[in-house]
Amino acid sequence: MCLHAIISAQILVLHRTAIGGFTTPELQPHSIPLDQIAAAVSGGQLAVLSALRQLASEEEVPVYLVGGAVRDYVLGIPTRDLDFVVVGNATIVATELANNLSGTVTVHQRFGTATVEIDGDRVDIVTARKEAYASPGSLPKVSFSDLNDDLARRDFSINAMALPLSGESPNVIDPHGGLHDLANGSIAILHSDSFTDDPTRMLRAVRYEQRLGFQIFETTMAELKKSINEGRVPAVSGDRWRQEFQKIFDEDRGSEMFSRAIEIGTLPAIHPALSNDAGLAPLIGETGLSPCDYLAALVRDLSPDDGDAVSQRLNLPIDWARMVRDTIALKEITPTIFETASKISAICRLLDGLDPESIAASARFSQDAQLATKLRRYLDEWRLVRTALTGDDLMGMGLTPGVKIGEVLQELHSAKLDGLISSETEERAMVNQIISRGS
Ligand code: CTP
């Protein structure tokens, strides 16, 4: 029987209370063979896991695998990261481990966290901690604590499970009903202040929901919407929201995630201009999309001012802000592109200077096949067209240096784009004509 089925059978007796809690944790302990976790990872991750297992078994250091890796193992899907919690001092453990395994370690002493890097693989090791939010949406105050507090500070029950690294087949520690929610396909917060404390969890909720094919649990959804209505979203900085956007950019179902976040009201609360998901529709089902694809889809129908306001709200880096601007500019010049349908040179002049990535994104997902073809031809052929003659050649033909040279080159270039000339001989003939007409 697969793990999922075993868990489903085990959790039938559980009943959820109003918000994320469970009446009777009658679930039988669910054990996971550590060798199976080890078999699913390799390289630096395996080296760290093996060393930590040894530390936990031989020196009885309380070390746990936590979060996504436990969740994904139970679901039978590959995991991305390994996160470990140490009840004690994670930075000492991580530093020793990096030394022993010839890796490197980055330590954040204040937070008691460390990242170990071995053979290009990164693993996070953190000290078990408690978090307290001084004000809604602010970063939490951290104090070192035990495993229970560490699990209780987390976002969703499915991410709040731990697996001790001692013994062969330890039981999953699951104080918040994560196994039950995995079996039920539910995304559930651990307490009613969760979204108020950390509104970025609103985007995390849709990310897990769409990634795993789950549903945000009813009372969790009610709390999410309540936090939006209470105005919790604007308190969070653009940088923190942008980081959540970036995590969605890395997902396969990013378009579904953004659409859902618009439907629920999170994106419109981040900025009111982000309230229309029409631009995302053509991306649904597509994988391997770039940040530019997503940005273009989100801002495509905005006015230039709204586009700038969104870029500012998310504190976008310069190149992304440019993609936003150019996507909107491209949308605005689309009617002109059609008016100048027969003149390739005129189309090129409209598109020259716009970010090619933005043009490519618009070409890929434009609903208008004719426009998409023109944009693609611009990218693949037209923008690569060069005249055979150079400025030096023109001077050799009798033109005096100055603005005129540039104008003639431009005229040649346009004529070549529009198919009026093609060979160098024809270019020379055209230059001679221009010289003799004297203008
Ligand atoms: N976490 C949280 N609240 C946040 C961010 C993270 O509670 N705003 C907790 C979650 O328990 C999460 C863990 O920190 O499992 C690690 O966060 P992250 O690396 O973002 O998630 P992973 O589970 O490692 O990765 P993913 O779920 O995307 O596979």
Image: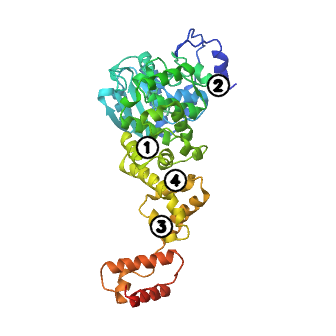
- In the picture of the structure, the residue carrying the numbered disc 1 is 120
Q: Is residue 50 visible?
A: no
| Nearest to N terminus: mark 1 or mark 4 | 1
Q: Identify which amino acid the numbered label 2 is placed on.
A: His
| Mark 4–mark 2 CB contact (< 8 Å) | no
Q: Identify which amino acid the numbered label 4 is placed on.
A: Ala
| Mark 1 surroundings within 10 Å by alpha-carbon count, few (fewer than 14), some (14 through 19), many (20 or more) | few
Foreground disc of the pair 3, 2: 3
Q: Identify which amino acid the numbered label 1 is placed on.
A: Gly
- In this rendering, position of residue 136 left or right of residue 228: left
Q: Is residue 4 above or below residue 350?
A: above
Q: Could you tell me residue 119's position as x and y percent? A: 44, 43
Tag 4 secondary structure? helix
- In the picture of the structure, the residue carrying the numbered disc 4 is 361
| Nearest to N terminus: mark 2 or mark 1 | 2
Q: Identify which amino acid the numbered label 3 is placed on.
A: Cys
